[in-house]
Image: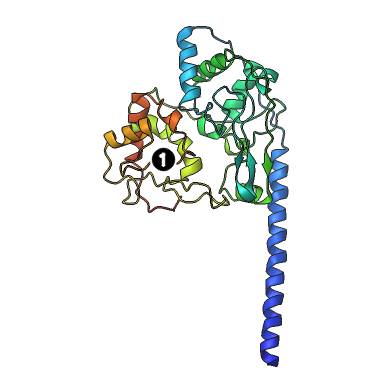
Amino acid sequence: MRIVKRILKVVALVVIIVLIGGGAWAGYQAHAFNGSMARIYTLPTGQIARSTDPAVLERGKHIAESIGACASKDCHGADFGGGNPIKMGPLGTMVGPNITTGGRGGDYSDAELARLLLHGVKRDGRGLTFMPAQDFAWWPDDDVLAVISYLRTVPAVARPSGEMQLGLLAKVLDRVNMIPIDVARRIDHEHRATAPMPAPTAAYGTFLANACRGCHGATLSGGRIPGAPAEMAIPLNITPHDSGLAGWTYTDFDKLLSTGIRKNGKTLDPMMPVTELGKFNQTERQALWAYLQTVPGKAFGGR
């Protein structure tokens, strides 16, 4: 009995030490996160001349409503006046702000908006929180100009922007690169990636697929988002693996984007930006499909 008690005491002591050590590590990671988010980036804003050309505005509308997914319900909303709060359990609550001239968009000059899109840096020089600028920092100057020009034509919405609420777990997972929340530190501010001209090729699809990795993971094999609550949808495998898109044709993929219905007849979870995917044009659809065919097949859950 004495031996058992001694063993239990040792086990209890080890558990306490582990908990203290784990808490100290988590605290250090949170401190590093806060320090990174407080950093001031001294990046020039450059020059930008807003356009009123109907073709430019139409291009900007297309990007904002499709590959940028800015108008999705979980981003900035259909009227760009702010999206629905995304409650992510211990990670916190994420919400896209009002970016019309009646909200935060009115606080920014066109040049400051361009810097925000390309560098993930706000007008005060600090980095963005959660908004995936790292996924579209490759947009060419013409497309950045088009998006900004279009946004300036959107009617002002007088609705307060929601506030991000980050839990300790979100900060820790960001620091270990499991969830991208600290945006600016993930962008190479010195060497901007250059995308090829839009074409139905894997080369162009490589850039479009950046927007998929936030949910489906770096390898696109899906699996539960780290730290997400149990009720949140689990992203699917979109690699050419048996647990993913093996056996799919472009026709199947095209139908998925248009209708939100998978090859097996099941409907995609509402968390997927089905409306925005449906607005991809044929060049973008074919390019994304071409790229997905080049991705190594990986079993579901590998993220």
Q: Nearer the viewer, residue 82 or 129?
A: 82
Can see residue 97?
yes
Q: Is residue 135 above or below residue 223?
A: above
Residue at the farthest bottom position: 1
Name the element at disc 1.
loop
Residue 25, position in %: x, y? 69, 58
Residue in view at x 51 percent, y 16 percent: 146
Image point (44%, 48%), residue name: 222
* Image quadrant in which you'd find residue 16: bottom right
- How many labels, in total? 1
Q: Nearer the viewer, residue 91 or 283?
A: 91
Quarter containing the N terminus: bottom right
Above or below: residue 23 compared with residue 147: below
The kind of residue on which mark 1 rests is Leu
The colour scheme used here is: rainbow
Q: Residue at x 47, y 48 (%)?
A: 234
Crowding at mark 1 (Cα within 10 Å: few <14, some 14-19, many 20+): some
Q: Is residue 113 left or right of residue 259?
A: right
Q: Is residue 175 visible?
A: no
Q: Can you identify the residue that label 1 sits on?
A: 268
